[in-house]
Each structure stands twice: as structure tokens, then as C-alpha cells.
Image (cartoon, grey):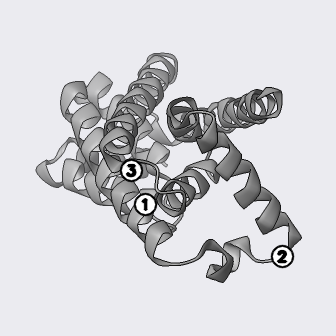
Amino acid sequence: MGALNAWLLAALSSGWGLWALGLAAFFDALIIPIPTELLVLTAASAFRAQGQPLPLAVFLVCALSFMAGDAATYWLGRAVPLSKIVFFQGSLGKTVISWAHRSFEYGGGFFTIASRFVPSGRTVINLTAGAAHYPLSCYLPLSALAGLLWSIYMWTLGYLAAGWLSNNPLAVMVIGFVVGMIVGSLCDVLMKVVAKHH
């Protein structure tokens, strides 16, 4: 276990650690589920233990990579009818599409940012933004802001946990993942409440 922890710290502190984070964030913003939060948590642990990678670099990489991935998913939503995508087939899928469309009718800013904290929500919002022809000039800055806020939140969580669990990125990842799922669930509930009241 100690060897694995040491390898994780060294990997995220190295030059290719940020490249790996950027690729993970890009594909995570697409339909491919990649746990980018685990890499950000480990990056925070690495910074606490070894001073690298710098948090500002982590935040910028996440913001830009998520924005690029969100843009790709947005254009997929414009090009392909959502009913043709396997995730949205059936009664539950239609309900999700209807909810997301209503969300954008009442202002997409809150939902774009909040959905970044909901693992399944961000893909739905990205695709629906494209399908609803939500202005890309508004959507991309919101996407970048959402990625920035999410990375600051996740990195801070990892940094604080690393202070408690010294040089143990695996434990930090477990705690951060659990807390992240709780926060994501709360954001999901909040988005539904806001949409219902509109």
C-alpha cells in the first residue's frame, strides 16, 4: 500500500500528471465516465507532500479541458436527436430530457454550473444545451467557470484531507469521492427544486 501511495504521489507530481488530468477531464465531459475527481484529489495530496503540481495549473487545466469536452458534447446534442441516444430512450430518458429543456428555458447559468457537481447531470445538461440551441457564446464561459469552481472545490477537499491523512492519497481519494457524491446528490436535489418552482 505504501508503494502504491508513493507511486501515485510521484505520478501526479511529474510533468505528464497534468496531461493525464487534462485528458481525463476532457473525456469525462463527454459521455465517457472517468473519475476525474480522483486525479484532482491526488494532485492536492501530491502538492501537500511534494509541492507539485501547482494548484493554479490544476485549476486551469480542469477549466479548459472541461470546457473543450463540454463543447464537444454540446455539438453532439445539436447534431444527434437526444431520443436516438441510448441513455435517453425509454420513459425515464424522456423525463430527463423534458426536465433539462425546461431548465434552459428559465436560464441555463445555474444549471450549467450546478450540474458540474452532479456526475450524471453534466452530460445531460451538455447534450440538452446543444439540442435546445442554447447560445454557445453564453454556454462556454459558464462551462469554464463551472470547471474552475469544481476543481477548486475538489482540490481544497483533497488538500484538507491530505493534511489529516498524511501521504496517503488512496485514503484521500476514498474520502473525497464519498464527500463529492454527497455534494453532487445535494446539487441534484437543488436543481430539481429550482426547476420545479419555475
Compare residues 134 and 12 and report the one nearer the observer.
Answer: 134
Labels 3 and 2: the sequence-earlier one = 3
N-terminal-most mark, 1 or 2: 1
- Of circles 1 and 3, the one toward us is 1
What residue does disc 1 label? 74
Residue 14 coordinates in the image, percent (x, y): 16, 47
Identify which residue is drawn at 27% across, 45% down.
12
Residue 7 is at least partly visible in this image: no
Q: Kindly state the secondary structure of the residue where label 1 is placed.
A: helix
Residue 150 or 130: which is nearer the viewer? Answer: 130
Residue 162 in the image: above or below residue 41: above
Element at label 3: helix
Q: Position of residue 22 (x, y in %)?
A: 27, 53
Q: Is residue 97 above or below residue 107?
A: below
Above or below, comparing residue 179 to residue 94 in the picture: above
Q: Going by the image, does 195 lie left or right of 145?
A: right
What's the residue type where badge 3 is placed? Ala
The residue indicated by pointer 2 is 90
The structure residue drawn at horizontal position 41% and vertical position 27%, both measured from the top left corner, is: 149
Residue type at mark 1: give it.
Tyr
C-alpha span from label 1 to label 3:
41 Å
Q: Amino acid at mark 2?
A: Gly
| Label 2 SS | loop
Q: Nearer the viewer, residue 105 or 149?
A: 105
Q: Earlier in the sequence, mark 1 or mark 3?
A: 3
Q: Which residue is mark 3?
A: 3
* Residue 68 in sight in this render: yes
